[in-house]
Image (spheres, rainbow, N blue to C red):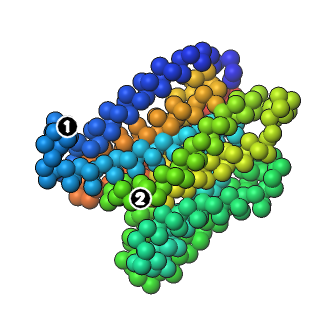
Amino acid sequence: MASHRTQVDGSNVFPLSLGLTVALLLALLLSVAIGPAGIGIPGVFGVFANPTAEATILFEIRLPRALIGMLVGASLGIAGAGMQGLLRNPLAEPGVIGVSGCAGLGAVLVFYSGITNQFALGLPFGGMLGALVAVWLLYRLSGRSSSTLSLVLAGVAINAFAGALTALVLNLSSNPFAAYEIVFWLMGSFADRSLQHVSICIVPIVLGWILLTRSGKGLNALSLGEDTAVSMGINLPQLRLAVILGTALCVGAAVSVSGMIGFIGLVVPHLLRPWVGYEPGRLLLPSALGGATLALLADIAVRTIPTPIELKIGVLTALIGAPFFLSLLRSMRRELV
C-alpha cells in the first residue's frame, strides 16, 4: 500500500495551512453574515462602523455560534488526526476510545437529573466530567503500559457501556418532553449558544490542542512501528497518555457544548493526509483548520437548507460521513486484495 503514496515535502505544509486558514476565515465571515435576519457580508462590516440593532444579533447570537463551530470542528479534526496516528489506522476517530460517548452520557445525566434547571451551565460541566471518566476507565481497563490493541478494545467496551446507559436514561425518563430534548441535543447543534459556553469550553479545548500538538514527533516515530519508536527514544505509555488525555479534553469539552457530531474527525484527516507526506505529526494543524472550516460550512448548510425545522448538524455530517466511510473501507479492501 505504501507504494501508492505520493510523498509530499514538509515545506508544503505551510502553504496548505495558509490556504486552510484563508478558507476558515471566509467560512467564519459567511457564518456570521448568513441567517434569517439577513445582515449580509456588507452588514457585518457596517456593524463595526455604525453599531445598530443588528449588532446584538451579530455579537450575541451568530458570533458565539460561529466560535463554538470553530472550536468544536478544530477539536474533532485534530483529535481525529491524533487518534489515527496513535492507532495507525485511517478509520479511527475520536469516538473510538469512548470519550464522545461518555461526554454525551454525562450531559444526558445532567439533563435527566434536572441540574440544568438550577445551573444553566451544568450541561458543559457534565459533558467534560463524562470525558474525564472515560479516560479514567480507559486506563483502569487497559493499563498504563498497554498495547494499542488493548486501548482499542477498552474504548469499544466503554463506548458500548456509555451507549447502553444513555439508552437506559432515555427509557426511564418519565417526562417525554425531557427525553425529546435529550435526543435532539444528542444530534448535535451550534444553535442557541452564548459566549458563556465559549468561555467554559475554551480552556480544556486549548489544553487538549497543546497536548496533541506536542505529540507530533512521537506520532511520526510511531508510524514506523512501536519497536522503532522505542529505539528512537519515544516513551510509548507517555505518548498514549498525551494523545488520549488531549483528545478527552478537547473532544469532551466540544461534545459538552454541541452534542454528538460525528465523522469530522474521520473525514478531514483522511482528505488532508496525502498533502503532508502521510506524516501524522504534520497532519495535526491542517486537520484542526480543516475541521473548523468543515464544521462552519456544515452549520451554514443547515441554516440555508429549506426545511420546516432546522436540521441538526450531527445529522448532516452523518449523512455525508457515512457514505465516505463506506467508500474508504471499500478502497482499503481493494488495496489489501
- Residue at figure coordinates x 57%, y 34% from the top left: 284
Instruction: Look at the picture and state if 118 lies above or below 44.
Output: below
Q: Residue under circle 1?
A: 45
Q: Position of residue 331 (x, y in %)?
A: 58, 31
Instruction: Look at the picture and state if 156 lies above or below 215.
Output: below
Amino acid of disc 1: Phe
Please tell me which residue lies in front, 306 or 30.
Answer: 30
Amino acid of disc 2: His
Q: Quadrant of the C terminus?
A: top right
Q: Kindly tell me whether residue 101 is visible in this rendering.
A: no
Q: Position of residue 72 (x, y in %)?
A: 46, 48
- Residue at figure coordinates x 59%, y 47% from the top left: 208
Q: Is residue 172 left or right of residue 62?
A: right
- Whether tag 2 and tag 1 are in contact, CB under 8 A, the answer is no
Q: Is residue 117 left or right of residue 37?
A: right
Q: Residue furthest bottom?
A: 174
Q: Quadrant of the N terminus?
A: top right
Could you tell me which secondary element the residue under label 2 belongs to?
A: helix
Instruction: Look at the picture and state if 181 lies above or below 243.
Output: below
Residue neighbourhood size for the residue with mark 2, other residues' Cα within 10 Å, grouped as few (<14), some (14–19), many (≥20):
many
Q: Kindly tell me whether residue 118 is visible in this rendering.
A: yes
Q: Residue under circle 2?
A: 197
Instruction: Look at the picture and state if 297 lies above or below 255.
Output: above
Q: Position of residue 323 (x, y in %)?
A: 48, 41
